[in-house]
Image (spheres, grey):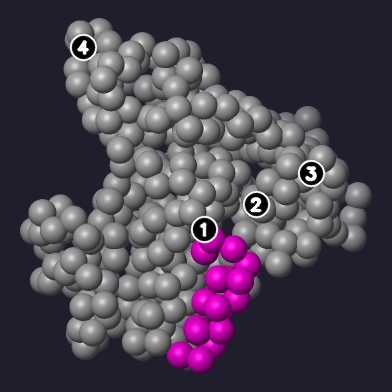
Amino acid sequence: MAKIRVGLIGVGGIARLHAQGYKDNPTGELYAVCDVDESLVRERAQEWGAQQAYTDYRQLLADPKVDAVEVITPHHLHAPIGIAALEAGKHVSMQKPMAMNVTECDALIEAARRSGKLFRVFENFRYCAPMVRAKELLDSGAIGEPLSIRIKFIQGSMGKGWKVPYSRWAWRFDEAQSGGGRIMFDAGFHYFGTAMWFLGEVEKVYSWITYRPIRPELANRGVSLIRGVEHVVGAAGARKEEVAAPDEWLIDSPAVVIWKYKNAEKYGTFEVVTSYDIFVRSKYTPEDEWVEITGSRGFIWVNRNTSHLLDRPPVVMYRDGVTTEFSDMEADWGASFVAGVHDFTDAIVQGRQPALTGEEGRGVIQFCQAAQLSAKEGREVRPEEIR
């Protein structure tokens, strides 16, 4: 059986993890890559073994050998590229968040319906082994009736790991390109999506969000800004990095979001803290999260996911006076991208819908933006208000 030939549109940092999903993929191969950075896209093509390299996504979509695409671009490009790909007869995997707003989500859903091609929103937490194990335990009734969920997200500092120049982060702090909210909208898609995955649809949301410049926070980890160049001071001495974060870059942290689920007296909370004095062990970014699910007979804790901040088993369950630890899983964050890529190409071959559907992705967007609107207007917001 011929493999599904996939094109990656966007070959920045996170695309490196997507590319890993094609190394030993029985149903898919990385056939083409595309990025506006010509030198980078050619470097990636050689590194990843892609047969074609393009600098214009329309050229990639015109290639008859491309069966499917993964869109891994800044958010404002998701809808136009996704719609064009569907209209070109390609299956589409869209990196989260699905689009900038509900209107664009609806346009993507309609384009997928017209094309008859598979469309899914890629959210790697759906494939993270600790999250998957927690969901399986919850659904099996291991802690009884689920009652509440708490999600904690921490941003800190790190030693080794990804080095992302601040110039590469610029679009994430431009609302016209990002949709707004580095945490509430960008990272928040993971957390609000997980909250809905575990306990269901949300009735109403209330939140408090602080927006503050990133520049003062950089000082907390030994960064001085001189003539627009970062001089990072560490154990090995000073080293230069790229252009520093402008004063207008705002981080939406600290923050607390609370919500009530539909048709039940069940509640959830999401807390965000940023402190560059907290060291986060990580191969990737200096961020991590943990989750606590309360049931009528006990608790499930997911102790780490993106990184390895807490030195504990990935999943722990307490029920009826007995604590059970689960370590028999691949808990590395990168493995979730490999699993997600495999599920995409497998689903195309098998003719089924993988997580998340366009409608589910739209619902998560509404949740994210309901949290933002609540903080802005100081009131409860129902996700269906976001239109």
Query: Which residue is most to the front?
Result: 227
**Residue 314 colored magenta?**
no
Nearer the observer: mark 3 or 2; the answer is 3
**Residue 148 versus residue 64: which sits nearer the camera?**
64
- Which amino acid does the dot numbered 2 rest on? Cys
Indicate the quadrant where residue 49 lies: bottom left
Q: Give the magenta-colored segment's residue range.
A: 97-115
Quadrant in which the C terminus appears? bottom right
Residue 92: x and y in percent read 40, 75
- Sequence-first tag of 3 and 1: 1
> What residue sits right under mark 1 in the picture?
97
Nearer the observer: mark 3 or 1; the answer is 3
- Sequence-first tag of 3 and 4: 4
Q: Residue at x 46, y 46 (%)?
A: 174
Mark 3 to mark 1: distance in Å? Answer: 23 Å
- Contact (Cβ within 8 Å) of mark 2 with mark 1: yes
Seen in the picture, residue 301 relative to 358 is either above or below; the reply is: above
Mark 3 to mark 2: distance in Å? Answer: 15 Å
- Contact (Cβ within 8 Å) of mark 1 with mark 4: no
**Residue 341 versus residue 246: which sits nearer the camera?**
246
Label 1 element class: loop
Mark 1 to mark 4: distance in Å? Answer: 36 Å
> What residue sits right under mark 3 in the picture?
377
- Sequence-first tag of 3 and 2: 2
Seen in the picture, residue 45 relative to 145 is either above or below; the reply is: below
> What residue sits right under mark 2 in the picture?
368
- Which amino acid does the dot numbered 4 rest on? Ala
> What residue sits right under mark 4 in the picture?
238
